[in-house]
Every structure is written in C-alpha cells, then in structure tokens.
Image (tube, helix red, strand yellow):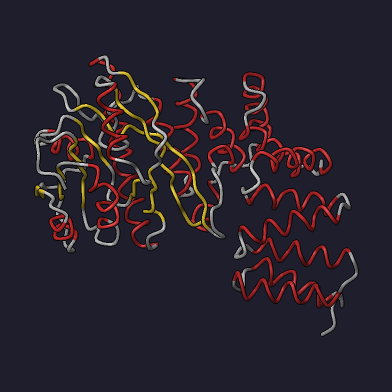
Amino acid sequence: MRRSAPLVSFCMVNRNSSETIGQCLESVAPLVDEIIVVDSGSSDDSPAIARRFGARVIERAWTDDFAAARNAYLRVATGRWILSLDADEVLAPCNREDLVALIEREPDTAYRFTIRNYFLLRNFEHSLAPGEFAGCPLPGISVTNSQTIRLFPNRRGLSYTYRIHESLMPSLQRAGCRVRDISVPIHHLGFLIGDQRIAEKFARYLDLGRRKLREHPDNPLAYLELGKLLMCAGRIEEALELFDACVRMAPALPNGCYYAAMARYKLGAVDECRQLIDAGLRKAPADVNLCYLLAVIDKRHQRFQKAANAFRRLADARPDHFPIQMHLAECCVRIGELLEADAALSKFRALAPWHPSVYLLDAELAYQRGDRRRVEEALSEGIAAAGPCPELLAYQDVSHALNRVPT
C-alpha cells in the first residue's frame, strides 16, 4: 500500500467479520493509499486482520445507526477520494491506473457500482421477484443486482443519511455532484454465510427499518423496504399496509405495485390483486413482476393454456428463475404438453434440487405416462433430497392406496 500523499482512502464499517474481511481488503489494497476501519465492538479477530493490511482501526460504540458509523470514517479520512465496501463484499479486479485516470478526469462525480448479491435459493424462494433476479451462477445459488454509490470525492458537506439503507444521495444533490455508473461490479457474499448470522442480521434490519420509518415518514422507500422485510417474516397484513402507503406516496416507484399486489395474493384477496395488476400493466405493459403474478393467478384459476403461454415468455426473459420453470412445468402437465413439461422440469431440478415440487412433478409426469415404477422412484428421491415433507408423503400414501405402484 502506498505511503505518499493520499489520493484514495478506503473506508469501511466492521463488526465480527473475520470470515470475510481479509478477502475484502485484499481486493482493494492495491488501489488505495489509506485504509480506515470503523469497528463497532468486534469480539473476533477481524480488527487484527484489518491491521495486517495496514488499516487504521477506530473503535466506536454501535448506536444502531449505519449512517452515523459511516460518517465517523468521513471525519478522519485524508484521501481526496473515498472508496467504500462492506466487510462481506469483494471488489472485482480493477486497475489502479484506470481508477486514477477516471477520478482525475471527473473530479465532481460520484460513482455508482452494481452490487451482485449472492444468496442460497432455498433461503429466499418465497420472496424471489423475477424482475429482481439476475441469474444463477451455480446450482442452488442465485444473485440479484442492486446499485449504490461507493466511490466519491471527499469533500465538506458530503455525509450519509438514514440509519439503515443509508444513502449519500441527499448530500450529493445538495452539493451538486454528478452521479455516474461504473462498470466494475462488487460481489456481496454475506447471504452465503451461516443461517444464524442471517437471522441475526434480519432481526437487526427489521428493528432499524421501523426506526427509519418513524424518523422519515415522508420517504416512500422506507415503507417499501420495511414491507419487504415483514413479508419475508410472514407478517403479510403489516407488510400490505406499508406497500399501500408506498404506492399512495410514489405510484411510479419500481416494484411498489407488485409488492402491494403480491401481499393481497398471499392473503387470498385475489380479485383485489388482479385489479391492482391490471392497473399496473396499463402503465407498464412489459413489467416482468406483474406479468409473472398475473400468470400465477391464471394458473390458480386453471387457465392453464393462458398461463403456460405467459410462463414461456417469462422463461425466455428469466431462464434461471426457478419458480417460473416450476409453474411452466406444471401448466404443461395439465395441458398434456409432456415433452415441454420434461424440459422445464429438467431446468427446475438443476436450479432447485432440494425443492419438493421437483419430485411431485416428476411423479405426476411418470403417472401420466403410466410408468408406475418411476412414480415410486421420484417420490423416494424427493424424500431423500427434500426430507419427509407432507406433500411427498401424502402423494406416496395416495399412490399406494390406489395401487398405482407396486408395494
């Protein structure tokens, strides 16, 4: 790391990130002149790992405020530019000379990075909107993309706002800074860490989201963010109130209409859901999320041919979104398109081999073809892969009772 007059300061907030912080710092160390780590009470060796990279570690008590923690490093950074990542992120390969040329060419510009958020499909399958889905790089692992500013000039007046989903945008707008996209992605690996860590993070975000909403009741994003967390927790009625408030405040906000409709669908208010979808599609006919939810409703009402046509189009646009492949396979079974059902099921199995519906659909296809031995094999494979879930056991019991397979 260079010891000359600082051009770029790398800054981050840390707490108990020994599993990931070394990889993070390794990805940025060749690019920067100074590393500052604000530590909010780690009990592991992550501060020591940071120091091995030459970092200045600043101890700061946690105040339930990510913006305050980030503003702490802005007060001490000496570089003319700030680069920031989270401790569970890794910067894609980037050349120091190219970075310097970029920031010196446009000194009044902040740069927005694409964050590639990797996660285990099985942990988020019930909240996986196809429009937010950005692929499946490995079996069982998927990715969504988000965007946020991570490189910006270190100047007076720039600071973070909001205790969660903290943002530089309000201060950048006040300062008259331009915002441009940069092609180098950041890989976010935190959701691949153990379930206990995810549960702790979720609970913390839920509490901070409530507090953010109380502090900024005029911010529609605060309603959408908290509503999505509540939906993940199964608290649909609470989420619906927040989604509706978001739509009232910002009808054009991306995904607001979809989540308000999805909450109604989960609560069984299908007619209201359909009305909201129709209104949304009049404004945005190609909205992937609304088209998906409409196809799900058509399938629910046994309009299988219409739903299959929609899922085919959606599968072309989002081939790695496993719920689309699942619905397409089921619709094709219902309309007798068994070869197409086979193809969709094969993709579904490759993407989500743990999912019980893989084996239920496999058994149903075998039954349609009169292959009784394969029915039993598919159900046995499903119980081995997905566990003794009620759906598989019930199908197996009925199959035996009707003497569909040899006992």
Which residue corresponds to the image point at 56% horizontal and 41% vertical from the top-left? 129
Task: Report the front residue among 262 and 4.
Answer: 4
Q: Position of residue 156 (x, y in %)?
A: 13, 22
Place of residue 103 in the rendered image (x, y in percent of width and height, measured from the top left)? 27, 27
Horizontal placement of 308 versus 38: left or right?
Answer: right
Image spot of residue 86 (x, y percent): 28, 46
Location of residue 397 with respect to 296 vertically, above or below: below
Considering only vertical position in the picture, is 204 above or below 363? above
Q: In the drawing, does residue 308 fall left or right of residue 105?
A: right
Q: Nearer the viewer, residue 265 or 370?
A: 370
Q: Residue at x 30, y 26 (%)?
A: 110
Residue 382 lies, with reference to residue 17, above or below; the image says below
Would you identify the image quadrant in which residue 16 lies? bottom left
Q: Name, please, the residue furthest toward the bottom.
A: 407
The residue located at (74%, 53%) in the rendering is 344
Q: Front-most of 40 and 13? A: 13
| Residue 73 on image: x %, y % | 14, 38
Assign the C terminus to one quadrant of the image. Answer: bottom right
Picture residue at 24% right of the left edge, 51% below the top: 25
Which of the 4 quarters of the picture holds residue 351?
bottom right
Q: Quadrant of residue 305?
A: top right
On screen, residue 157 versus residue 382, left or right, reads left
Give the total of numbered labels.
Answer: 0
Residue 316 horizontal side relative to residue 375, left or right: left
